[in-house]
Amino acid sequence: MSPSKLNLTTSVVNKIGALRAGFKTSAILALVPVFVAVSVGLTACGDSKVIVSEDKGLVSSKVTMGDKEPIWPNDDPSIPDGGGVYQAQNCAACHGVDGKPVAGKATVDFSSKDWGRNQKPVDQYDFITFGKTGVEHPAMRDKLRTSQIWNLVFYVRSLSTPPLTDAEISEVLPVFGANCAVCHGTKGYGNGPLMKGNVLEPAPANFQSFPRFYDRTDEILWDHIANGIKWEGMPNFLGKTDKAKNITFDRDYIYKLVGYVRHFHESNKTEAATKAAHDKEKEEESKPAQQENKPQT
Ligand code: HEC
Ligand code: HEC
């Protein structure tokens, strides 16, 4: 490890010490040698999606509504493919092409941001798959595969909150890199350089975890980024600035960060394109490290 990397880490650790009341800097400094010792063997930890299921067939009727674990998707759900399912299943007959309810058929407005931001993906999955007691609703359990239902969930969500475009993702990338990646990792696995020494307890959230993030509304994510999570090492960002990037973390920008967090577990591309992109990433990661140092031509 280069000395400069160590210094960077030490200074960030000190910053966190300041953030976490009652946690003495000296105690954190004592952890740094541990960091050096441990990090060598830990580079691969956590580098995978948390809970990925095979997309075998129709959702089993044995996975019941309510308290049981849903079947998680086998890759980031595809919003455009979900649009295809929405059309094929004629959801628009009651919910409208743009999510605005058809009079006399439904009342919920999928295009409303206030509604969308307060929905957990997992609850929407449950409703679409099994329906709900007391509501007359087509259940998709016997019609669609697991991944098709997840695609549908994220398509419905996109009617109020469109996913970040590729251009927006590239725009937020350096801001995320400068403010979040030290803990959460560039790819969101919760394994940033700071975490490699297991300095933080609890560990920074892994944005690739389906069970965790499908159990969050956008409002909750917004609140956690805006106000931080006290005593747990997640700083508060609302009202702060990143002068180097000329960014103010205001209400709207924090919603953009929510969209960025979501892009680690939903996709604005087709299923096939999402898989191709992930395969390519894996291939690049498995290349020998020295290739990175090749001179630019
Ligand atoms: C026959 C009309 C009809 C069709 C077709 C229909 N829905 Fe619904 N949907 C409703 C009604 C009624 C509700 C209950 C809330 C309301 O009154 O708007 C609802 C509610 C919902 C909800 C919200 C549940 C909540 O927590 O409030 C979701 C999500 C949903 N539908 C998704 C879909 C999807 C996806 C499709 C296509 C596979 C679909 N619906 C097809 C009538 C319909
Ligand atoms: C100093 C380390 C650190 C930095 C920097 C940091 N986080 Fe976190 N973050 C954490 C930790 C630790 C948790 C987990 C807290 C827990 O599990 O309760 C967390 C949790 C989260 C969560 C999950 C909350 C939930 O509902 O589960 C989100 C979203 C999040 N961070 C976003 C961000 C974003 C966006 C940034 C940059 C703008 C950022 N974090 C910067 C340490 C950090």
Image (tube, grey):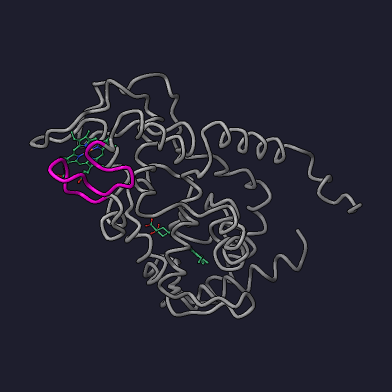
- Looking at the image, residue 261 sits to the left or right of residue 132; the answer is right
Instruction: Tell me, yes or no, whether the highlighted magenta stretch contains residue 101.
Output: yes
Instruction: Using the rendered view, name the quadrant where residue 47 is placed.
Output: top right
Q: Is residue 208 magenta?
A: no
Position in image of residue 140 (x %, y %): 27, 27
Q: Pick the quarter of the image with the N terminus.
A: bottom right
Classify residue 266 as left or right of residue 63: right
Magenta residues, as a range? 93-109
In the rendered view, tell whether residue 262 sits above or below residue 55: below
Residue found 66% across the figure and 55% down from its top: 37
Name the residue rendered at 37%, 60% in the picture.
Answer: 221
The quarter holding residue 121 reads top left
Q: How many marks?
A: 0
Where residue 56 sits in the image (x, y, percent)? 42, 19
| Quadrant of the picture in which ligand 2 is shown | bottom left
Give percent across and percent down for residue 81: 45, 34
Q: Main secondary structure of the magenta part?
A: loop
